[in-house]
Image (cartoon, rainbow, N blue to C red):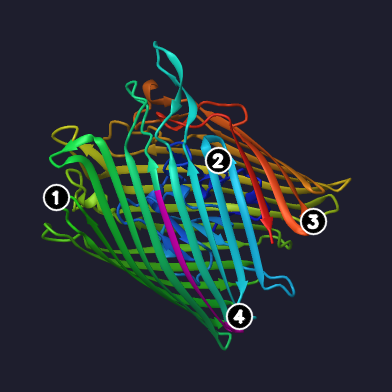
Amino acid sequence: MPVQVLSGKQLEKLNSLSVADAIRYFSGVQLKDYGGIGGLKTINVRSLGSAHTAVFYDGMTVGNAQNGQVDLGKYSLDNIEAIELYNGQKSSIFQPARGFFASNTLYLRSKTPEFKKGKNTNIRTALKTGSFGLFNPSLLIEQKISEKTSFATSIEWTKADGHYKYRYQKKAGYDTTAVRKNGDVAAFRSDISFNSKISETAKASLKAYFYDSERGLPGAIVANNYDHIQRQWDSNFFMNGSYQKSFANQFDLLANVKYSKDFSRYIDPDYKTLEGALDNKYYQNEFYASIVNLYKVNEWWKTSLATDFSINTLDANLYRFPYPTRYSYLGALSSEMHWNRLDIQANLLGTYVQEKAKYFQRGNNQKVFCPVIAASYQPFESKNFRIRAFYKESFRMPTFNDLYYTFIGNSSLKPEFTTQYNFGTTFLLEPKKTLQTASFQADIYYNRVKDKIIAMPSSNLFRWTMMNLGEVEIKGFDSSVNLVVKLPAEISLDLGISYTYQIAVDITPKGTTYGDQIPYVPENSGTLTSGINWKKWQLNYSFIYTGERYSQKANIPINYIQPWYTSDMAIIWDAAILKKSVKIGAEVNNLLNQYYDVVLNFPMPGRNYRLNITINF
């Protein structure tokens, strides 16, 4: 399966504050960014939609049954060791069933405590400040309890007023510069984790996470309306435990359990109800359990059975709210065969979803089976060149909002089905004196989405309804190159280049936009990341290009969005002061002060600055 990884030094040179900022550099990815530090940020991989990408944090899924959106702007990079994006699924068959079911998977891995000899405590403190009134302190403490057990805790506070200048133009009208308002955010994050190596064949972990925020929603700049006063509160908590054990080097067991509780509140003073201003509150709960069994039949053949069970509930303070409850049973039977030059993996995925909701006589029950097959082949003697291919069928359930949202929901919706084909190559060059590492990766792919869930107007523009009508065809090419070059005078150069070409068109039978590129998908996009290291200094430069797009389904001039590009630079000094490791960095983002929208009428910041300092004790 194609995989892209950002970790360690690579993450540091991207001028990224959150996970959302970093994933913009993956090929085949569109990030929907509604502007500023507090704006919603969701991922769309290979134009399949954000609901088709599962997000995992330290091996546990992070989801939202209400709307299917995971806001990646909430996840700070402060304690993230690596970000991994898999097209299709993670290649290992030793993983929970949820990892097999999504069309794409994004894995976030937090730092694992490491202690130098004779040291039992690590402390790291950091502070970021800069444009938009940003104030972002954080603290990480790692403690060795025994030779086999350690714990880590981190806390972080983010506060910003969100004010930045943007340009507003109107055809045959005026051109003005205004200040983005109501984009403030105040957020607190904390987590604590315990890791224990019980024996040589067993390990366990326990993690608790809490996030709480209040933010303004700056809204779209339309009809000369620059000011918005809507507010949103979010509170997210989860606790999960994991246990893994090997038996006789032939049988492996992995057990996971998780409980999560999410709260969101939305206030719109401009929208009046009989009780006053609109004030919606939503409460989500999820219980999740998973067991994975792996059996090594012999040296070249492994099989596994993964089973998951989850319960999702949603409550709200709305009139005649349906209070839905969803029971999901997932199973993945997998087989992996490894020979000298050939690897083959096959999965059979099965799920049964049972749903109950108040005011509805029957629930949205579903039974679905999906096959997956993947292969990797080494055609020559050299192990550095391989070709790979996979075929995968997957689906995503309609969200609670799709099914039950007042005036909009349709309880008879069917799941969205995706079919994915992928063929690609990987090539690694042997290290040389000057060229330390070099890797090349290229993939061509074909995706098809059936029964796409879309919103259609009904009796009036206030009352819409969700329907299974859409069908989308996606053809694309992803490529990436990564080089590390060692030069004289202790200078080293890191270079990463990615390019994506993608045609994603609406092929809904008898549709009015048949053959048109779907909204917000550019045909051409690419990124460049580079870094020059010299002794204690590092200079980083990164570039993102997104080609022309359309904001609506119809590819007509009024919906046309111009291409945009940004350049970011940073200089970092990393040395020791009083025997303490100190890192100081200065960043300039959007160096050329480009005015652009990722999502139409949600202007992005122009040139902005950030300073940061990190001290390790």
Residue segment shown in magenta = 198-213
Q: Amino acid at mark 3?
A: Pro
* Residue ID at (39%, 10%): 172
Is 248 on the left-hand or right-hand side of 561? right
What whole-number distance in Å separates the C-alpha atoms at marks 2 and 4? 38 Å
- Which of the 4 image quarters holds residue 296? bottom right
The answer to which of marks 2 and 3 sits earlier in the sequence is: 3
The reply to whether discs 2 and 1 touch (Cβ–Cβ < 8 Å) is no
Q: Nearer the viewer, residue 172 or 435?
A: 172
Task: From the top left corner, tell me how far across and down residue 306 is, in percent.
Answer: 42, 74
Q: Which residue is mark 1?
A: 319
Please indicate whether residue 387 sits to the left or right of residue 255 in the image.
Answer: right
Give the x, y percent position of residue 361.
10, 60
**Amino acid marked by disc 2:** Thr
Position above or below: 198 against 223: below
Within the magenta stretch, is there residue 110?
no
- Relative to 364, does residue 563 appear above or below in the rendering? above
Which residue is tagged 3? 431
Task: Give the mark nearer the N terminus: 4 vs 1.
Answer: 4
Residue lying at 48% horizontally and 25% vertically, measured from the top left: 166
Task: Give me the disc on residue 500.
Answer: 2
**Label 1 element class:** loop
User: Can you see residue 88?
Assistant: no
- Marks 1 and 3, Cα distance to the nearest angstrom? 66 Å
